[in-house]
Amino acid sequence: MLRLTLAQMRRSLGRLTAAGIAIVISTAFVAATLLAGDAMTRTTYDAVSRSYAQADLVLSQAPMTGKDLAVVGSVPGVEAVHAPLTGWVEVPNGGGITYLEVTTPAQDPRLEGSTVLDGRLPDGPGQIAMPADVVERLGLSLADQVPATQTTYREDPEDPENVVPDTLEDELELVGVLDDTGTALMGGGPAVVDRTDLARWLRFLEPEATTDVHHLVLVAVQDGVPVTEVRESLRTALDGDIAVRTVDEQAAETVAGLTNSAQVFTAIVLGFAAIALLVAALVIANTFQVLVAQRTRTLALLRCVGADRAQLRRSVVTEALLLGVAASVVGTALGTLVVQGVLGILTRMDTDVPVPDGVNLTAVSVLVPVAVGVTMTVLAALAPARAATRVAPLAALRPAEAPRVTHRSGRVRAVLSGLLMVGGFAGLALGVVIGPRVDLMLGLAVGVLGGAASFVGVLLGSVFWVPRLVGRFGRLLSRGGVAATLAAANTVRNPRRTAATSAALLIGVTLVAMMSTGAASTRASLDEALNDEFPVDVEVITANRSAGAPAMPADVLSGIRGTAGIAAVAELTSTVVMVNGTEEIGVDAVDPAAAAEVLRSPEQLAGLDASSVVVPAAVARWSGITTGSEVTMLSDDGTSLTLTAVVTDLAAYSAVVLPEVLEQLDPSAAVTSVWVRLAHLDDVERVVAEIQQLASGADVAVAVQGAAVERAFYQRVINTLLAVVVGLLGVAVVIALIGVANTLSLSVLERRRESATLRAIGLSRRQLRGTLAIEGMLIAGVGAVVGSVLGVAYGWAGAQTVLGEVSSVGLTVPWRDLALVLVVALLAGLLASVVPGRSAARTSPVAALAVE
Amino acid sequence: MDTTTSPPSTTTAAVRARGLTKTYGSGEAAVHALAGVDVDFAAGEFTAIMGPSGSGKSTLMHLLAGLDSATSGQAVLGSTEITGMDDRALTRLRRERIGFVFQSFNLLPMFTAEQNITLPLELAGAKVDREWFDTLTTTLGLADRLTHRPSELSGGQQQRVAVARALIARPDVVFADEPTGNLDSRSGAQVLSFLRRSVRELGRTIIMVTHDPSAAAYADRVVLIADGRIAGDITDPTPESVLAGLDALRSLDDLPAVVR
């Protein structure tokens, strides 16, 4: 029987290859995900353990004092101990401050975690060694004097209610540049200063605290003494709270915390791999169904000569098993090669993150993808295997007919599919209602369940609706000529196969459309939230505005207006007034028309008139002002005005009035700040830099605050995530397209005689190829269109369920993405028909005359 | 009964072959399927080509119908030489001037009988001549079967649909390849009478390849072929005269059979 199976496989090699490619891609996906996850973990592990230099043991978890250190030193086998102090230092540069982690050098070079690239480590007070990236960022070079400050806040001796800043200023000489490779994941490597300096700083920050406390102690063990033995002695000698671990244990412990997120990431990507596997399973099931149908005569003949049902089933399952093993091994190898290639490229690209230069093949990373691929293939072949057993021996005696796989579509299937769809969509709708109103998690659960159920219903029912839709589309096309008529008729000949092919594509397209609609809708509502949070893209203010801010220099003002990429500018004049006789607050005045153009949420200044003042919610909270309350403002020159307060969400710390109102309070008020709206948010970095350049030339201090930077960052995160997700789902679409090509080539083989007949009665080669092209595009197009519609519905429902509470989510249809999906699907359908079309066109019309 | 070798005529021939040769393989392994055939088929006549298996009768038909390319010689349809035509020209020719009837019917299963019949016109982008369509379907007894799909028709009915499909475009000539091979004798006889009627009443030209003497007897003329050569010619055949002609082929192997 095995020989027979092999012989049959050889005969169907072409068909099996197509299914094999689907398996290869999906197992490669799984293998690559596992290996990449492992590489991420190892990268983290290396980065962590690197900071321990050549230490053998690491003591951590509880603070250790000098007494503990003495104990450690006295334990036999301990050769060297390094108990670094750690802290932070501020390095002022230009307008900002760089915060640097600092540590102290080790006496024993084996325990020194820092590697010196240039210069040396500090060997006395007043010296510092900094990581290369920081040195570069600050534009320093060796022997430069680096300002270093420590700032703390202490109780004001005159007013115990108040705190005042206290600053310690130092000048350190840059004596060394440190290697910063491998520290990116840990938030950058520390700078190194002498122990006396750091101890002094720590005492300044907390005079009462002892500097004799260490949170991490590194220990080197004498050569020849087993590390575990010393570990045990230390555990006995020290307080039980102190953890004594080998470097490997310590790194694993740290990594466990850090890689929680890496594992979540791997799990998510594996979820996408599962979708790819599901699609591949559909393609495989489809292929085997056709293989069995094509072998009906052979199978029947075997039954006639005495093969029993179990043998036939075994034959099909064995075939699937062999295909699964072969393709999965290839897929795993391919996935490994891809990850290896990417790692190779990353290593050469000199990124800040040290990547392993090779994949780490473990039993898991090899066996899991293979096992998954084989299991999936065999499972997918079970239904076709059952179909093989249903072949009656009599079929061998019947005249040969074109093989068919038309089964009567069961009533059970219809009912089940209908119930799932109705119930599922109801659940989806319920989720949209419950999510924002009752409970988010409950709504989400109901919605996800409903969505999944309805999708399963749609897939189950595909055998009913796909052929109908394809037929209808086809009839629309059939006015386009005989090729279209033939194609339309051909696609509905085998409803089950057409449905399965279309459904495979449907899965991928639905998910892509769902993600893209969800993201588009979320982005729209997130935009609203961001508009409220960051109403002004860029704010330019003269420094120290609270106490009589200096006027904005005219050349800066005109310079801002002249900056490219700016959509609107509003100038604000300001003064400081006493409110209700108690609080001093800043008051800004802005022309409402200009403000409306600049603000991303103009309603925050709505209702501003000559008798009112807009009070930001933050100011209102501590001053006790509410909407409608009377606010009396007293200016420096004694003018008093009473206005009605309007409290809004304006994210500012100054009240806002009309320019004519401010004119009465402070006739000499100057323009002290400017609100800028950008034409394109992506320009924000450039615009901010240009304005900063302008401001640096001014003789008053000017600060540029770009809320748009943060905003652009959020948007970029969403866009990147979306691109990654769509890319991952794209794999499923690619596999589905292989399914389309597979279906078409099977059709070509089956219809050999028909094609020849058509050629004999006058169908040209071009028309024959055209027929297949249209057929491919019909199958792909229907899958893509239905998938898009479903995806839009799911995506919107998801966004509505999650964000409905925050803001009303409008349905944002990502037309561009959907059009792209459709075009790709149609092109791929066309492409899928090229090879089958060529082989069909090669058929000589003489074949029509041949008798089987 | 008057059966003679007919001299090649040039005036009313619908299809002519001159020195038509087809060789498969080369050198010592070469097989001469056709070894220089000269034959004319008159317009408005029902001709049967007969011969034992491997005699080259099918090859002759393939070459005459432009389905296969000749090694040398000429095949002429009306006044058009078809040997040497490219695929596009041949496709046009088949579409407009040649009809086919196959042994295994070869109807398209997804189309109704009517759609199958009018398919050649659709391929050519031509309009259906309803009158001609009605004449054909009535003559062939298909009028009440037009909405049925092939799977709902008997073998005889399917072959009659195929005959109608072959005739719908009023081709210069219809080639029929063992049209009764897959039919029982009653259905076969029906199809053959329709073929004969379409020649006599509808003025068509039909060339049929068969190995069944009783089928050949329906023709106006039988061309016998053996070993790739024309081996005899029978006018107004009867099953008996055809059998006699075939017997003569066997006994006189290489010589042209002249049956008295």
Image (cartoon, rainbow, N blue to C red):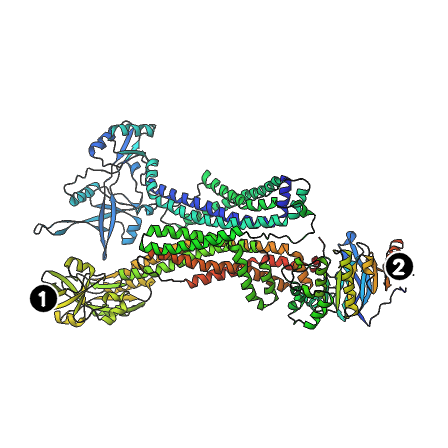
Q: Which residue is mark 1?
A: A636
Q: Quadrant of the N terminus of chain A?
A: top right
| Front-lying residue, A143 or A181 | A181
Say which element carries label 1. loop
Can residue A805 be seen here? Answer: yes
Image label count: 2
Answer whether labels 1 and 2 touch (C-beta < 8 Å): no
Q: Residue A530: which disc? A: none
Dividing the picture into quadrants, the one containing residue B130 is bottom right
Q: Which residue is mark 2?
A: B257
Residue at image point 66% right, 67% down: B118
Please tell me which residue is depicted at 68% across the width and 47% down the height of the picture.
Answer: A396
Q: Are marks 1 and 2 on the same chain?
A: no
**In the image: residue A486, left or right of residue A603:** right
Residue A785 image position (x, y, % from top left):
48, 61
Query: Is residue B17 rendered to the left or right of residue A275?
Result: right
Picture quarter containing residue A799? bottom left
Q: Is residue A89 toward the left or the right of residue B143 in the image?
A: left
- In front here: A283 or B81? A283
Q: Which residue type carries mark 2?
A: Ala
In the rendered view, would you say A706 is above or below A290? Answer: below
For mark 1, name the chain: A
